[in-house]
Image (cartoon, helix red, strand yellow):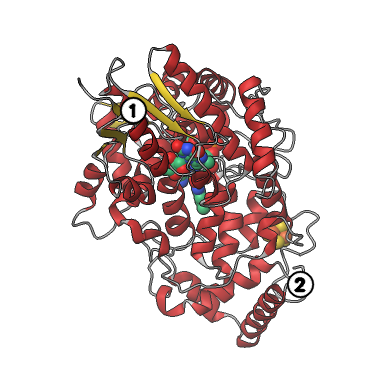
């Protein structure tokens, strides 16, 4: 008799066309899907993230059964549940007398190693939901002095033919980013992404998550995420029809009380398999060709998806498992309690953390230029910062989160991803947001009790990293400007920064 094989489908592989399912045989094989405590707690994920993954897993399992598959599904509170993916594989292998496990390679080194360590035959197939493979990235990266995203992106544009006119980029330019930095006009009304009322499956999962993960940071309710492909397609349709046209213009803007602005809010669905990157890009390109959205918006979106998203995945697998423990700037300060919702006088940080707690979402510039910028300026331990980002966002999976945090945001990889650190004083935040209005601190003040901490810490960062950055061609001008300042003024700024960091360390509300 031909033995059954186990087909593993993880919580972020919920796609009918995933490579493991493509080679499986309905009559012979058993699909295994397992809700396990180990995955829900290896970092303290936001309750909405756990709810999204579990609800989407349950609905996907139903769809597979309706399609004729045999699915062995472990619920989190099943008595026999061993609590881990390897444990559930071993348990089901014995139950079904399976002699081979077929998986699509997980998006995290931790799980790849766990599958390799199993005392069973395990085949890990490439995850070909991406436009480029780790091997292709390695071929591109090998021998290059710098792994800049822009060059990689152009190669992927050529490969996919997206926004190409023959060999040339549509409109004559590869990148329209310079048009994508507008402040939001006061009377503009951003369209909200669609929200979904919990159905019975989602309701059960919400009860479970409320019961088991109440101590995790973040509000569970209201839970409005899409949890199946049909709903995710509705989010995509809404974005293409109502939001995309302005996506580019206000991509970098931040407005208090408006978490989503003109962002797509599709990363959770792309990352767990409910949407595919090429279908999103093709829809966006069609919208441009039909005159529904301008080129700066469509190119901006496509660059994020086939540029940044593919690039960070390439970096994650190219750089290897030690990437998440890199700490090029030797930062070690623990994460302040206000990252977990304690009070801070900094309106910008308070706004972004509050929004993160309520929605498990912040858009890119909020992650990079508010919380990330603060963490880098204040010298927070990049490992702790990485764990924070991996925990608190609904779209956080290590392959995408780590290069964004360790690389782009914290410069902890020593410049593999970013050619210079993403740091700014309060001036940038004041220009791109309305957060400074009504803040306890004064964004124009460079010294003194009310000086914006971003102003103080910016120069502290610049000064303490002089040896590393003063000859960086993109930063030399900053050092020249700083060195021209009056020595007394420089001393006052650095003294105030040190005092402020002292207050932060002592646990004072800052
Ligand atoms: P939009 O702004 O509407 O962009 C559209 C899509 O482009 C996104 O859905 C996403 O798939 C893709 N994209 C945009 N920027 C990036 C990027 N830098 N890297 C990869 N894909 C990108 N994104 C995640 O998906 N998961 C993470 O865990 C994650 N962690 C981050 C941590 C830090 C410190 C920073 C600075 C960025 C992080 N990002 C992460 C990238 C980005 O912030 C999110 O992809 C984006 O905010 C998701 O919201 P959206 O769908 O509304 O995006
Ligand atoms: C994020 C997550 C959570 C919270 N729970 C599960 C789970 O119970 N079962 C599962 O198969 N996957 C889960 N996931 C997604 C995995 O953590 C993800 O597959 C790995 O991090 C690799 O990207
Ligand atoms: Fe943030 Fe400084 Fe503006 Fe306050 S003044 S919101 S701390 S940038």
Give 344 or 297, whichever is nearer the viewer: 344
Q: Residues within 10 Å of mark 2 (few under 14, many from 20)?
A: few
Lower position in the chain sequence, tag 1 or tag 2: 1
Circle number at residue 180: none
The vertical placement of 417 against 212, above or below, is below
- From the viewer's perspective, is 68 left or right of 464? left
Give 451 or 126, whichever is nearer the viewer: 126
Location of mark 2 (residue): 508
> In what quadrant of the picture does the N terminus appear?
top left
Give 198 or 231, whichever is nearer the viewer: 198
The vertical placement of 232 against 86, above or below, is above
- From the viewer's perspective, is 228 left or right of 8? right
Residue lying at 58% horizontally and 36% vertically, measured from the top left = 77
Circle number at residue 96: 1
Residue 125 falls in image quadrant: top left
Estimate the x, y position of residue 102 in percent, counting from the top left.
28, 33
Which mark lies nearer to you, 1 or 2? 1
From where the camera sits, is residue 259 visible?
Answer: no
Q: Ligand 2 closer than 8 Å to the CB at disc 1?
A: no
Q: Residues within 10 Å of mark 1 (few under 14, many from 20)?
A: some
- From the viewer's perspective, is 389 left or right of 110? right
How far, Cα to Cα, is label 1 from label 2? 58 Å
Q: Ligand 3 closer than 8 Å to the CB at disc 2?
A: no
Estimate the x, y position of residue 141 in percent, counting from the top left.
24, 52
């Amino acid at each position: 008799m031909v033995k059954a094989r186990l087909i593993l489908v993880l919580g972020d592989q919920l796609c009918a066309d995933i490579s493991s399912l493509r080679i499986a045989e309905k009559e012979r094989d058993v699909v295994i899907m397992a809700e396990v405590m180990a995955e829900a707690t290896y970092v303290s994920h936001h309750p909405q993230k756990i709810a999204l993954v579990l609800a989407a897993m349950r609905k996907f399992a139903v769809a597979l059964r309706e399609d004729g598959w045999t699915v062995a599904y472990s619920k989190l509170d099943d008595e026999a549940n061993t609590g881990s993916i390897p444990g559930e594989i071993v348990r089901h292998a014995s139950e079904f007398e399976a002699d081979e496990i077929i998986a699509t390679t997980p998006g995290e080194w931790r799980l790849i190693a766990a599958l390799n360590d199993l005392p069973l035959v395990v085949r890990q197939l490439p995850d070909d939901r991406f436009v480029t493979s780790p091997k292709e990235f390695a071929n591109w990266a090998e021998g290059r002095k710098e792994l800049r995203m822009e060059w990689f992106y152009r190669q992927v544009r050529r490969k996919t033919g997206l926004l190409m006119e023959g060999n040339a980029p549509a409109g004559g330019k590869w990148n329209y980013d310079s048009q994508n930095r507008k402040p939001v006009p006061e009377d503009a009304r951003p369209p909200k992404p669609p929200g979904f009322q919990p159905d019975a499956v989602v309701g059960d999962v919400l009860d479970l998550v409320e019961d088991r993960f109440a101590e995790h940071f973040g509000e569970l309710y209201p839970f409005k995420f899409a949890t199946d492909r049909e709903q995710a397609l509705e989010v995509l349709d809404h974005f293409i029809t109502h939001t995309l046209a302005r996506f580019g213009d206000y991509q970098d803007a931040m407005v208090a009380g408006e978490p989503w602005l003109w962002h797509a809010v599709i990363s959770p669905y792309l990352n767990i398999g409910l949407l595919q990157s090429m279908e999103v890009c093709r829809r966006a390109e069609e919208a441009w060709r039909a005159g529904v959205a301008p080129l700066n918006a469509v190119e901006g979106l496509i660059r994020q998806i086939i540029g940044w998203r593919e690039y960070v995945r390439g970096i994650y697998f190219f750089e290897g498992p030690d990437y998440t423990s890199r700490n090029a700037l030797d930062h070690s300060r623990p994460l302040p309690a206000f990252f977990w919702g304690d009070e801070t006088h900094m309106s910008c940080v308070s706004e972004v953390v509050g929004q993160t707690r309520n929605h498990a979402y912040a858009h890119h510039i909020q992650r990079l230029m508010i919380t990330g910028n603060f963490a880098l300026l204040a010298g927070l331990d990049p490992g702790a910062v990485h764990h924070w980002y991996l925990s608190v966002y609904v779209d956080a999976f290590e392959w995408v989160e780590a290069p964004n945090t360790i690389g782009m945001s914290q410069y902890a990889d020593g410049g593999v991803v970013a050619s210079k650190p993403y740091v700014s004083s309060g001036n940038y935040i004041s220009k791109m947001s309305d957060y400074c209005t009504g803040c306890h601190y004064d964004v124009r003040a460079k010294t003194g009790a009310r000086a914006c901490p971003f102003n103080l810490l910016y120069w502290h960062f610049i000064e303490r990293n002089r040896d590393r950055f003063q000859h960086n061609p993109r930063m030399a001008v900053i050092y020249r400007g700083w060195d021209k300042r009056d020595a007394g003024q420089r001393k006052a700024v650095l003294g105030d920064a040190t005092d402020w960091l002292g207050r932060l360390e002592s646990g004072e509300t800052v």
